[in-house]
Amino acid sequence: MTRIAGSLGPLLGASLLQTSFTAGLSLYAVAFVVEGVVVFALGTETKGLPLADTLEP
């Protein structure tokens, strides 16, 4: 999914920039806001921690 989104994102953004500069930049702004909300919702990084430290008691 990441590879697909990574290749389609710039293509979609570039096509929107050709039609409307505001629409192209708005697409990237919305994507950054969604990414920020997802990072906030998922919490802290657990990479490298033992499984016992990542589970709620």
Image (cartoon, helix red, strand yellow):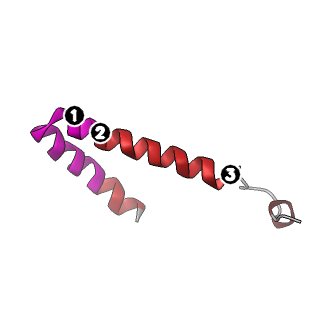
Q: Residue at x 63, y 55 (%)?
A: 42
Task: Give coordinates of residue 34: x percent, y percent.
Answer: 46, 48
Quarter of the rendering containing residue 46: bottom right
- Please give the residue where the numbered disc 1 appears in the rendered image: 22
Q: Name the foreground residue: 49 vs 56.
A: 56
Compared with residue 35, is residue 52 higher up or lower down, i.e. above or below? Answer: below
- Please give the residue where the numbered disc 2 appears in the rendered image: 26
Q: Amino acid at mark 1?
A: Thr
Q: Name the foreground residue: 27 vs 5.
A: 27
Locate residue 37 relative to residue 42 in the image: left or right. left
- Please give the residue where the numbered disc 3 appears in the rendered image: 43
If the image is split into quadrants, where does the C terminus sit? bottom right
As for residue 12 lying within the magenta part, the answer is yes
Locate residue 38 relative to residue 9 in the image: left or right. right
Task: Give coordinates of residue 24: x percent, y percent.
Answer: 23, 39
Task: Give coordinates of residue 5: x percent, y percent.
Answer: 35, 58
What are the residue bounds of the magenta stretch? 8-25
Badge 3 marks a residue whose secondary structure is loop
Q: Which mark is residue 12?
A: none
Badge 2 marks a residue whose secondary structure is helix
Dominant SS in magenta: helix
Q: Residue at x 80, y 57 (%)?
A: 49
Badge 1 marks a residue whose secondary structure is helix
Q: Which mark is first along the chain, 2 or 3?
A: 2
